[in-house]
Every structure is written in C-alpha cells, then in structure tokens.
Amino acid sequence: MRSIGILLPLLLSLGTTASLAEDDPEHGRQLYATCAACHGAQAEGNRSLNAPRLSHLAPVYVVAQLQKFKAGARGGSSASESARQMAAIAGTVADDQAMYDIAAYIATIGGGASAKTLAGDQEEGARYYQQFCAACHGPAAQGNLALNSPRLAGADDWYIVAQLEAFRSGARGTDAQDRTGKQMRVMAGVLPDDDAVTAVATYIRSLAE
Ligand code: HEC
Ligand code: HEC
C-alpha cells in the first residue's frame, strides 16, 4: 500500500504517453458543457428531447456506449432518430481519453431518480424482472459490470421502455459489431407484449426508491 501511495503520484507527475492517462473529471466537466444542452446540467435527462438521465450509469458503461455510437454500432441507419442524433454528437468527442474524462465527471454528479411516468402492473413487472432480467442486471437492478450489464435502478422509466422497444424492433442491438447489444436484444424479445414492457419498466423504476 505504501509503495502505491508513493508510486502513483510519481507516475501521474511523469504523465503517461502510450496508454490512457488517469481520468480527469475536471477536463470532463468542461467537455460535458456540450452534453448538458440535452442531458441537463446534473445529467438528469430531458424527456422532451428523448435524452436520458446519465448520472446513475457506471463510467465504463458510459464510455462503452459513446464508443458504440461513435463507431456506428449504435445509432446507425436502422436506429431511431434520437439514437442517430446521439451518434452524431459522439462523433465529435475527440478520443477515448475525452470519453473517460466525461464519464468520470458524470459519476461525480449525484441526484435522485426522475419522476415516474408509468403506471404499469408492478407485481407482474416484478415477476418478469426476477425471472428474465435479474440474472444479469442484478436483483436490485444495480447492474453487473462483469456481464457488461448496466445499472437500471435510477434510469428514466420512459427511457427503459424506449430502449426495450428499440431492442425488440431491431433499432438497437442488430449491428454486427454490437455483441452486448445482441445479448440484450434476445432478452427483450422474451417479454410477450407492450404491457409486459410497461410492467417491467414500472417495476424497475420502483427499485430506485
Ligand atoms: C442533441 C442532444 C444530445 C446531446 C448534445 C448529447 N446527447 Fe447523449 N443522448 C441523446 C439522446 C436523444 C439519447 C438517447 C438515444 C437513444 O434513444 O438510443 C442519448 C443517449 C446517450 C447515452 C446512452 C445512455 C444509455 O443509458 O443508453 C450516453 C452515454 C450519452 N447520450 C452521452 C452523452 C454525452 C457524454 C454527451 C456529450 C458529449 C451527449 N450525450 C450529448 C441526446 C444528446
Ligand atoms: C444475458 C444478460 C442480460 C439479461 C438476462 C438482460 N439484460 Fe438487459 N442488458 C444486458 C446488456 C449486456 C446490456 C448492455 C447492452 C449494450 O451494451 O448496448 C443491457 C442493456 C439493457 C438496457 C439498456 C440500458 C441503457 O441504459 O442503455 C435495458 C433497458 C435493459 N437491458 C433491460 C433489461 C430487462 C428489462 C431485462 C429482462 C427482460 C434484461 N435487460 C435482461 C444484458 C442482459
């Protein structure tokens, strides 16, 4: 422990050349100004722009999604207009370092969950969730990074519905490069109908309390 305490600041002061430098949330804060226009100053989301809350997401997931948008694995020609819009923005983020810095900044902004917008059958949703979703997203929807599965607790309920519908229709998770999206697309397909989608999203939203 002691040697790490001495070495880390030394390494940082030397700077890194080949690999990524340490995340810089202050630099991320400056870059986030562009994002705030849609996602809000507190990364709380803005429903009227279809821009989701981001503050509940782990940095590694934020980076993974930005990389996908930038590479066209998400937000390509078959995607929704919202996703294509986000892909265009991701194309303007300079490089992976900038993505890590922005994600590190987002992780510093906390906040409560957004307002409920759904009134699906929560008990039915709980049954679907525990049967089909908990194995990857965790029993409390806390996410499981080892399975690339994001936190869902705290996400906007309308966004959960929009993304489940996107996976179900093939607007998300069909690109050949999108391995993790494909996994999720299979799971979105096990929900029988729109009522089940609403129910499961209503239940997930209740977990943020
Ligand atoms: C013009 C509005 C707009 C701007 C500016 C914008 N976004 Fe987005 N972003 C969106 C929309 C809309 C979505 C939802 C896309 C979808 O429905 O698939 C989104 C989705 C995302 C997602 C995926 C979240 C998830 O849980 O799936 C991330 C991460 C993200 N944006 C990060 C950023 C960052 C970082 C910036 C700044 C560099 C940024 N956005 C700027 C509109 C915007
Ligand atoms: C086999 C593991 C697995 C199971 C089971 C699973 N998911 Fe997922 N889910 C994922 C992965 C991996 C992602 C990330 C996809 C990506 O990287 O684009 C994801 C993404 C999502 C997203 C998008 C979140 C965001 O912010 O972008 C939602 C919503 C979601 N899952 C809901 C569900 C629901 C509801 C169920 C149950 C019906 C479920 N998932 C079952 C693995 C799983």
Image (cartoon, grey):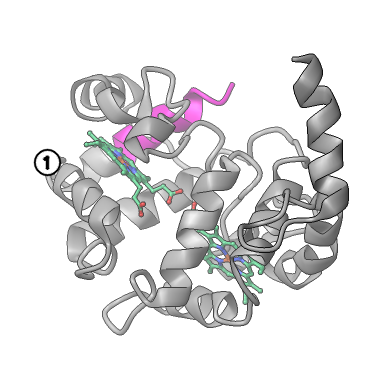
Distance from mark 1 CB to nearest ligand 2 atom below 8 Å: yes
**Would residue 144 be found to the left or right of residue 172 on screen?**
right
Residue 172: give x, y in percent of width and height: 29, 64
Up the image or down, 117 lies above or below 145; here it is below
The structure residue drawn at horizontal position 57% and vertical position 40%, both measured from the top left corner, is 58
**Residue at left offset 74%, top offset 15%:** 1
- Quarter of the picture holding the C terminus: top right
Q: Which residues are magenta?
A: 198-209
Q: Which residue is mark 1?
A: 190
The answer to if 179 sits in the magenta stretch is no
Place of residue 30 in the rendered image (x, y in percent of width and height, measured from the top left): 85, 65
Q: Main secondary structure of the magenta part?
A: helix
Q: Residue at x 47, y 43 (%)?
A: 157
The answer to whether residue 57 is above or below residue 81 is above
Q: Nearer the viewer, residue 96 or 82?
A: 96
Q: Position of residue 124 (x, y in %)?
A: 25, 24
Please state which of residues 203 and 84 is positioned toward the viewer in this rendering. Answer: 84
- Is residue 200 within the magenta segment? yes
Counting other residues with Cα less than 10 Å from the Cα at mark 1, is it few (<14), some (14-19), or many (20 or more)? Answer: few
Question: Image check: 107 left or right of 89?
Answer: right
What is the three-letter code of the residue carrying label 1? Val
Q: Quadrant of residue 203?
A: top left
Which residue: 30% across, 84% down? 77
Could you say where residue 61 lies in the image, as x and y percent from the top left? 50, 47
